[in-house]
Image (spheres, helix red, strand yellow):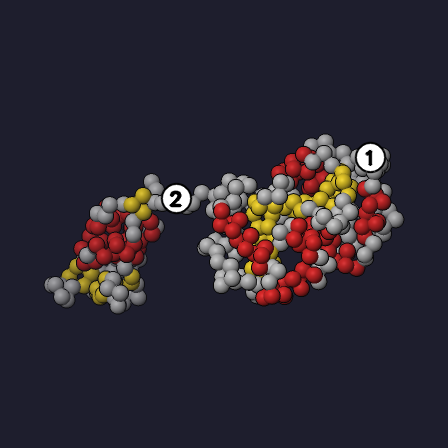
């Protein structure tokens, strides 16, 4: 039964002496009363338990010979070998007789794709803040990753400069300065967002997300090329995380950034299959990236997506690093995704099932 008893209220309602009387034997008269220890393992021949009241007004007992002690709840736990919850219930049933309050259920998670209005407000404010003077270091962080203003604006990237500039409810990311990456759905609506700390506090992740009661994590973000880019139709680039997705978008590709990239799930595969486009997977050049790409390739094969092209950045690189190091990376990719090669599956998969050919000549293939 899901009901709740307030612990402080319970302790205020019970008379500890009565509880000890019920659990143990008492000697002495009022004022100088003592009880045998409530711990069944403590053979307390000469009663050692006394009662006092602490500074908060809570009655406590102490066993002066065995070192035991605590509140009425602790006495019941010890004497009857009960859990805290059961001890509280026992005390209420036998001594306090409080009316239990029905436990308020936690707020339900938001449905997928329907974030709370506060989420959209935060994203909109962050979007405006990115272009203000105090956000210079956040713009610099993004520019250093090779991202231009056009692609940042097209994808509604923002800046979190703290509560003074950007109020937010509890359950939102609470560290700053941070770049704010909205996760847009395919129609360009804000579904979710991630805050990426510029200087993550020691021991904390670089990313923080809103709590589920504000928005459900869609596991992916759609990114669109800026109007200034040469659009490359017929292919969707899939990346690990939004920054790499922005790099691909800047190069003219519609892209899907997988959030929590080690686990591209069924939903991501469904969305990609739905585009009827060739899918170009460009995850990180490391073991986790390979595993994620394997998994996604498997899900796509299950959905009969024929044209899956897998490109790996050089070992240890992600797409951002690769693009920074090699400005011709897009030319190299597009030789492989330019029509009519789109939709044409190379005839010779290698022994591990991965497509050969696309990496050849790039020096980056498997
Ligand atoms: Zn004791």
Mark 1 crowdedness (10 Å alpha carbons): few <14, some 14-19, many ≥20: some
Q: Is mark 1 within 8 Å of ligand 1?
A: no
Please state the horizontal and vertical placement of residue 306, each as a whole percent of the image.
76, 34
Kindly indicate whether the residue at mark 1 contacts the one at mark 2 (C-beta within 8 angstroms). no
Mark 1 = which residue?
Answer: 344
Please state the horizontal and vertical placement of residue 31, each as a whole percent of the image.
13, 66
Q: Residue at x 69, y 46 (%)?
A: 224
Q: CA distance from mark 2 to mark 1?
A: 53 Å
Q: Residue furthest right?
A: 361
Q: Nearer the viewer, residue 229 or 176?
A: 229
Residue 145: tell me if it is visible. yes
Mark 2 = which residue?
Answer: 105
Q: Nearer the viewer, residue 88 or 309?
A: 309
Left or right: 282 as drawn, with respect to 159: right
Count the numbered circles shown.
Answer: 2
Mark 2 crowdedness (10 Å alpha carbons): few <14, some 14-19, many ≥20: few
Query: In terms of secondary structure, where does tag 1 sit?
Result: loop
Q: Is residue 275 above or below residue 13?
A: above
Q: Residue furthest left?
A: 29
Left or right: 241 as drawn, with respect to 117: right
Q: Which mark is residue 52?
A: none
Q: Nearer the viewer, residue 351 or 339?
A: 339
Counting residues from the start of the chain, the first of labels 2 and 1 encountered is 2
Please state the horizontal and vertical placement of residue 103, each as a whole percent of the image.
34, 45
Left or right: 266 as drawn, with respect to 348: left
Q: Is residue 231 above or below residue 29?
A: above
Q: Residue at x 73, y 42 (%)?
A: 236
């Amino acid at each position: 039964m899901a009901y709740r008893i307030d612990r402080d209220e319970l302790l205020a309602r019970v008379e500890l002496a009565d509880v000890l009387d019920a659990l143990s034997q008492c000697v002495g008269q009022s004022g100088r009363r003592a009880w045998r220890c409530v711990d069944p393992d403590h053979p307390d021949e000469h009663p050692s338990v006394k009662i006092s009241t602490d500074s908060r007004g809570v009655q406590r007992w102490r066993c002066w010979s065995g070192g035991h002690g605590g509140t009425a709840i602790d006495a019941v736990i010890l004497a009857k070998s009960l859990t805290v919850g059961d001890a509280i219930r026992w005390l209420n049933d036998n001594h306090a007789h409080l009316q239990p309050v029905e436990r308020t259920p936690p707020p339900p998670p938001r449905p997928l794709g329907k974030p709370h209005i506060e989420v959209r407000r935060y994203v909109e404010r962050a979007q405006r803040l990115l272009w203000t003077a105090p956000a210079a270091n956040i713009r610099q962080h993004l520019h250093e990753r090779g991202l231009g203003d056009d692609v940042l604006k097209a994808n509604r990237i923002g800046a979190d400069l703290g509560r003074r500039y950007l109020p937010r409810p509890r359950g939102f990311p609470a560290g700053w300065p941070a770049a704010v990456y909205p996760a847009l759905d395919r129609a360009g609506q804000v579904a979710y967002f991630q805050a990426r700390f510029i200087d993550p506090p020691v021991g904390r992740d670089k990313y923080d997300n809103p709590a589920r009661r504000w928005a459900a994590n869609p596991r992916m973000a759609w990114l669109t090329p800026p109007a200034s880019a040469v659009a490359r139709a017929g292919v969707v680039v899939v990346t690990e995380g939004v920054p790499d997705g922005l790099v691909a978008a800047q190069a003219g590709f519609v892209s899907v950034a997988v959030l929590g990239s080690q686990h591209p799930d069924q939903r991501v595969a469904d969305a990609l299959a739905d585009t009827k486009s060739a899918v170009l997977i460009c995850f990180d050049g490391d073991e986790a990236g390979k595993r994620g790409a394997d998994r996604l390739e498997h899900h796509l094969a299950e959905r009969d997506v024929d044209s899956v092209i897998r490109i790996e950045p050089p070992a240890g690189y992600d797409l951002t690093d690769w693009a920074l190091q090699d400005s011709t990376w897009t030319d190299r990719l597009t030789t492989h995704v330019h029509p009519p090669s789109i939709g044409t599956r190379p005839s010779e998969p290698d022994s591990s099932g991965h497509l050969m050919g696309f990496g050849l000549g790039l020096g980056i293939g498997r």
